[in-house]
Amino acid sequence: MVWTKKRLNNLFFFIGVAAVVVMLFTFDISFAELWQHLCQAGYWLIPIIGIWVVIYAINAWAWMCIIKGNLKDGEIVNPKSLKSNFFLRIYRLTITGYALNYATPVGGLGGEPYRIMELSKDIGTERATSSVILYAMMHFLAHFLLWFSTIFLYLALAAVGDLPMTPVIGVVFGAIIVFCLAAFYVLSRGYKNGVAMTIFGWLSHIPGIRGWATRFQESHEKQLLHVDEQIAALHRQDKRSFYSSLALEYLARIVQALEILFMLLLFGVDCGGGFSGITLTFLHSILILSLTTLLANLLGFLPMQLGVQEGGFVVSIAALGLSAALGIFVSIICRVREIIWIAIGILLMKIKD
């Protein structure tokens, strides 16, 4: 059977729908308890869910920086698509791509191929591939930058007596610093030399897809090398687009912490109230987000990081001296928000530009 883009689109759609159904019936709590948590959140659900309109817009903007930087002196397949409505198209693909990533094991097996397939209609397969790979790398780099920078945020808060500092915490921070520095090195090599050929080199050693990956690499070697050239060119020739995209992705992580802030305020956690109290609570929210995403990404092969994200929230919130019950509440509301946005992203797949 020939897999046309329409058939692949339908396949992604049905995978997403199936994932949403499974997630709805795999909550660790009863629907009665879930409803109780939702009622407790009340009107706060509006900003908790709504803040992701802003977050995805920043993500789309970051991806747009890469696409425009990658298109310099490049061939455009469909010039009409790069006019005023192009950002809305990228915004839609951003939401849908993340929805597929959340819904499938090993995030990226769904979202990135879908983005490449759709974006290739506008800028060609090679440039779509390099743009999507570059954006995925930028998304990872922003995460590592968040984990790295929040160590110093914690140290600053510990220095003023707001948070504890123990030898165990110091050892953990040392391990995270080494982990992040190693990631910075690997990603910098990827930006300088490209990663398409490397990725297929790894895939060619995985049982089950070894034969397909080897054949694809051999038959598309020229195109993959061209993709790597485009990846390296953006970092080398258009540093403004590169660092603008990185800054925006990092900003998206900081804005995401508002979601946790809203839930802490809902529970009356405001560090004394007033502007200074809410500011300190927001800094705590950034720390909670950083630790939770670190734990979730370490086991990112699980769909929606089932169980890992919940545990991450409980551990990170307890580490700041807050109750485990609050961690469970935050994790449940975040899970509900994810399901809602996954459903939105899957439905957006059927909207034609």
Image (tube, helix red, strand yellow):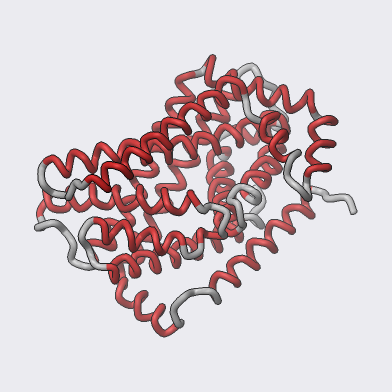
Nearest the camera: 291 or 168? 168
Which residue is at a point 35% across and 47% down the rendered structure image?
290
**Residue 71 appears in the figure:** no
Q: How many marks can you see?
A: 0
Residue at the extreme right of the image, as rendered: 1
Lateral position of residue 61 relative to residue 123, left or right: left
Q: Nearer the viewer, residue 166 or 16?
A: 166
From the top left corner, tell me how far across and down residue 146 is, in percent. Answer: 36, 39
Q: Quadrant of residue 181?
A: top left
Q: Quadrant of the N terminus?
A: bottom right
Horizontally, residue 101 falls left or right of residue 8, namely left
Q: Is residue 172 left or right of residue 216?
A: left
In the displayed structure, 222 sits above or below 139; it is above
Q: Residue 308, percent across and down? A: 46, 60
Q: Looking at the picture, tell me which residue is in the foreground, 285 or 276.
A: 285
Picture coordinates of residue 328, whole percent (x, y): 35, 69
Quarter holding residue 57: top left
Residue at the far top in the pictured view:
237
> Residue 163's x, y, as percent?
17, 49
- The answer to whether residue 187 shows anywhere in this view is yes
Residue at the bottom extreme of this rendering? 32
Q: In the displayed structure, does residue 180 sit left or right of residue 229?
A: left
Q: Residue at x 18, y 66 (%)?
A: 268
**Residue at horizontal 27%, vertical 52%?**
285
Q: Residue at x 47, y 19 (%)?
A: 239
Please determine whether, in this image, residue 283 is positioned above or below residue 72. below
